[in-house]
């Protein structure tokens, strides 16, 4: 199953983030965020953190690689692998797998730098396509049973956001 959302503005992206946060707050999730620079990977993560009640200010991890937020409903680990490039990511791929287990949310920007382009565990793949200054298309795909269930649960509540 692929879920597709057409976001006309930042408010629509926030609605998708809220639906996502409400869907995964009991289970956690591992999310690979794909999309060009400026697509909105960090913006989406900020909104998801907002609806998980993260109290700290959420900032882009592009310089520090990983930001951790433990003040919300579940721990959030926000990676940006861009600076590591493929070679660097190869050195942490086992570690990344550990972040796919348990009731935590892991958001990974530039997961496509992972050596096999595919990380070999249960995960969601969120693609954000830049259409215009304010418009984006978001697609959600799942690899593995846990992530498939998350998509099914999101789909059940799609009428709440109507995008
Ligand atoms: N509908 C939208 N969804 C997401 N971001 C949007 C949208 N409209 C405008 N933006 C803006 O686009 C920019 C996305 O930047 P950012 O989230 O840092 O991208 P990335 O992390 O993918 O490089 C932000 O300034 C955000 O406010
Ligand atoms: Mg970013």
Image (cartoon, rainbow, N blue to C red):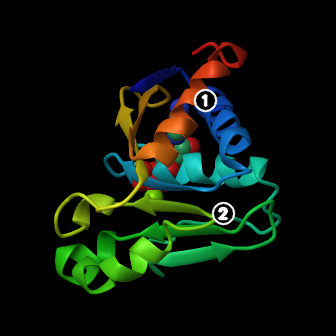
Q: Quadrant of the C terminus?
A: top right
Labelled disc at residue 103: 2
Q: Quadrant of the N terminus?
A: top left
Cβ of mark 2 under 8 Å from ligand 2: the answer is no
* Residue depicted at 74% across the width and 63% down the height: 74
Instruction: Report how far apart the C-alphas of labels 1 and 2 lie in the structure.
Output: 18 Å
Specify few, some or many for label 2: CA neighbours under 10 Å numbering under 14, 14-19, or 20 or more: some
Say if 148 sits above or below 152 in the image. below
Cβ of mark 1 under 8 Å from ligand 1: the answer is no
Q: Position of residue 12 (x, y in %)?
A: 62, 26
Q: Does dot 1 land on a helix, a strand or a loop?
A: helix
* Residue depicted at 63% across the width and 13% down the height: 162
* Residue depicted at 70% across the width and 55% down the height: 49
Labelled disc at residue 154: 1
Q: Position of residue 32 (x, y in %)?
A: 40, 54
| Image quarter for ligand 2 | bottom left
Query: Camera-side residue: 92 or 61?
Result: 92
Examine the image and state in which quarter residue 63 appears.
Answer: bottom left
């Amino acid at each position: 199953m692929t879920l597709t959302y057409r976001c006309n503005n930042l408010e629509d992206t926030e609605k998708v983030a809220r639906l996502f946060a409400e869907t995964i707050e009991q289970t956690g999730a591992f999310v690979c965020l794909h999309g060009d620079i400026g697509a909105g990977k960090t913006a989406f993560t900020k909104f998801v953190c907002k609806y998980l009640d993260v109290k700290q200010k959420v900032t882009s991890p592009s310089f520090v690689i990983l930001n951790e937020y433990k003040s919300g409903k579940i721990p959030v680990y926000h990676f940006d692998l861009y600076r590591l490039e493929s070679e660097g990511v190869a050195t942490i791929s086992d570690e990344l797998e550990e972040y796919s287990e348990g009731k935590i949310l892991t958001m990974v920007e530039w997961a496509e730098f992972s050596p096999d382009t595919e990380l070999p565990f249960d995960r969601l793949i969120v693609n954000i396509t830049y259409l215009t200054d304010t418009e984006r298309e978001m697609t959600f795909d799942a690899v593995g049973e846990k992530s498939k269930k998350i998509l099914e649960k999101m789909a059940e509540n799609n009428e709440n956001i109507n995008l």
